[in-house]
């Protein structure tokens, strides 16, 4: 593993940002909004940004000529490389400037370190699953536990996640801060605000579920739906490639692949609601996006969803096809009667922009 240097200057009240393992589409979209805001903070100069060697963030260019951007090259399989990076090789990230780690796992290095935890897979599971992914998450939890004493502050996005993280790792109680995030910049700047259906009331529902094909996203529930039931759905748009279609028996499920920000705004402007199926989330960005736009939401009756959506969402039992059918039928009936959700109270606790988030993160790093 090598670090490739791109730019050679340092500056004042300063900080460093570590994101060498942030390669997933959702996390990358978050950081494309957050990184510029961190660099624009008027009280802090970002000395160095440690980038991944793949994914959209590998080509990130700092707007500040004094900021060093360094690519962390991986020569080994990712899990083994991460083990070494967080332990034996972590000394290269030691430094006097506070280090904001955006990739969930603490580093065994010297200096003030704050870790932003975005994945629910670090939480202690009810039961260990003997599988490749189960082993990978066990290794991640072990690394977290091994290095957590090196961290001065942890940042999560909800109180539910803070409580679950402190329950999983009692040694960090009192160190966990909650900072919600707004929608991505591309949606903030879109000006989109929905106040009703686009299609006539008599039409069936048009829905969207924007999620990658990870098991916890629960696309598998769709494979259990009975096509003979009277589903009030004209189209469900999934952001999966066609070969990963989870429910060939349902003619109304449409896999469109990854959608660009422009295509997402277009989709949000015409659909009737967001359908969210995920079994576990540290936050649930599509829920925040739907609330920001003003869309109805149908989602699982789970703590992460209740925390974000309150009583305005329509809930179903996450493993029950009949419960989902009842929820969608309820949505159709309510829309036919002229109902539309009001998310104003739920959005009040979410920062208005990414500059506010960046300011709070950097303030924590300099306590």
Image (spheres, rainbow, N blue to C red):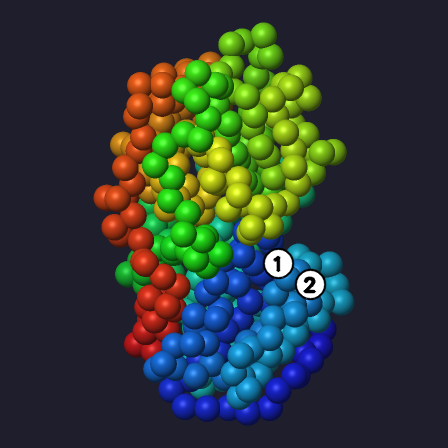
Q: In this image, 361 relative to 57: left or right?
A: left
Q: Position of residue 21 (x, y in %)?
A: 60, 62
Let me know if residue 301 appears in the view.
Answer: no
Let me know if residue 198 appears in the view.
Answer: yes
Element under disc 1: loop
Name the one closer to the observer, 107 or 62: 62
Q: In this image, 4 relative to 202: left or right?
A: right
At a point 38% along the width and 86% down the height, the residue shown is 13
At a point 49% along the width and 51% down the height, the residue shown is 119
Residue pointed to by mark 2: 54
At a point 31% along the width and 19% down the height, the residue shown is 337
Which image quarter holds the C terminus?
bottom left
Q: Is residue 129 above or below residue 143?
A: above
- N-terminal of the two: label 1 or label 2? 1
Which image quarter holds the N terminus?
bottom right
Answer yes or no: do the residues labelled 1 and 2 have beta carbons within 8 Å? yes
> Disc 1 and disc 2: Cα gap in Å?
7 Å
Element under disc 2: loop
Q: Is residue 14 above or below residue 109?
A: below
Q: Position of residue 363 (x, y in %)?
A: 32, 74
Residue pointed to by mark 1: 23
Q: Is residue 309 above or below residue 60?
A: above
């Amino acid at each position: 593993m090598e670090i490739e240097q791109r730019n050679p200057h340092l500056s004042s009240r300063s900080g460093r940002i570590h994101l060498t393992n942030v390669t997933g589409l959702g996390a990358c979209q978050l950081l494309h909004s957050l990184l510029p805001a961190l660099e624009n903070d008027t009280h802090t100069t970002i000395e160095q940004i440690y980038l991944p060697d793949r994914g959209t963030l590998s080509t990130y260019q700092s707007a500040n000529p004094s900021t060093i951007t360094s690519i962390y090259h991986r020569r080994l399989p990712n899990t083994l490389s991460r083990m070494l990076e967080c332990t034996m090789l972590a000394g290269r990230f030691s430094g006097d400037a506070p280090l904001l780690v955006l990739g969930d796992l603490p580093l065994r290095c010297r200096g003030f370190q704050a870790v932003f935890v975005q994945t629910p897979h670090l939480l202690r599971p009810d039961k260990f699953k003997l599988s490749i992914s189960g082993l990978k998450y066990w290794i991640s939890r072990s690394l977290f536990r091994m290095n957590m004493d090196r961290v001065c502050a942890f940042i999560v996005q909800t109180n539910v996640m803070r409580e679950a993280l402190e329950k999983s790792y009692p040694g960090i109680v009192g160190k966990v801060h909650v900072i919600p995030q707004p929608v991505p910049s591309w949606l903030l700047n879109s000006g989109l605000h929905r106040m009703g259906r686009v299609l006539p009331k008599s039409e069936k529902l048009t829905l969207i579920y924007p999620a990658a094909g990870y098991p916890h996203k629960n696309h598998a529930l769709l494979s259990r739906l009975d096509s003979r039931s009277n589903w009030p759905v004209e189209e469900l748009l999934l952001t999966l490639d066609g070969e990963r279609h989870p429910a060939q028996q349902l003619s109304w499920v449409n896999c469109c692949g990854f959608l660009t920000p422009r295509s997402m705004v277009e989709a949000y402007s015409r659909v009737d609601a967001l359908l969210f199926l995920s079994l576990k989330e540290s936050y649930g960005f599509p829920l925040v996006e739907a609330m920001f736009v003003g869309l109805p939401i149908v989602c699982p009756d789970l703590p992460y969803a209740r925390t974000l959506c309150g009583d305005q969402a329509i809930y179903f039992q996450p493993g029950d096809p009949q419960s989902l059918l009842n929820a969608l039928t309820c949505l159709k009936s309510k829309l036919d009667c002229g109902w539309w959700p009001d998310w104003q109270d739920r959005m009040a606790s979410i920062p208005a922009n990414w500059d506010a988030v960046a300011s709070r993160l950097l303030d924590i790093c300099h306590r």
